[in-house]
Amino acid sequence: MTNESGQNVVRYLVRFSGHVQGVGFRATTVGEARHLAVHGFVRNESDGSVELDVDGPESDVKELIRRIQAAMKNFLDDTQIDVLPPRGHQGGLKIRF
């Protein structure tokens, strides 16, 4: 799928695991997304992981993941990424409770 600018639009469901809750992970994710054209949500999961459901231009989605991994590297053990059909999230990236 492409957007009106001809950019490839993707949706990634990303699960970050390690010591990722209680360390500002969700707030950091929203902050890193602020200047990227990405939409979706980030939330804590009951198993101690953090889930990111994000879509947008592929380059921005990949840049967001790179930024999160760099900013939170001391807390991360693993990052799992599933590619899903884009849903057309709107309204930026939000924390979901």
Image (cartoon, grey):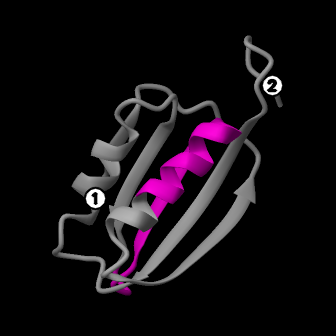
Q: Are marks 1 and 2 in contact (CB under 8 Å)?
A: no
The amino acid at mark 1 is: Arg
For residue 97, what is the image quadrant?
bottom left
Q: Position of residue 69 (x, y in %)?
A: 44, 67
Quarter of the picture containing the N terminus is top right
Q: Which mark is residue 14?
A: none
Mark 1 packing: few (<14 Cα in 10 Å), some, or many (20+)?
many
Find numbered disc 1 in the image and state the secondary structure of the residue it sits on: helix
Find numbered disc 2 in the image and state the secondary structure of the residue it sits on: loop
User: Which residue reaches farthest top?
Assistant: 4
Tell me the residue at 31%/81% (across/down): 74
Task: Provide the residue span drawn in magenta.
Answer: 46-67
Tell me the residue at 33%/84% (across/down): 48
Residue 27 is left or right of residue 12, and the answer is: left
First reached walking from the N terminus: tag 1 or tag 2: 2
35, 50: nearer the viewer: 35
Q: Position of residue 34 (x, y in %)?
A: 34, 34
Residue 96 is left or right of residue 10, and the answer is: left
Q: Position of residue 6 (x, y in %)?
A: 80, 18
Q: Which residue is mark 1?
A: 26
Observer able to see residue 97: no
The amino acid at mark 2 is: Thr
Q: Which residue is mark 2?
A: 2
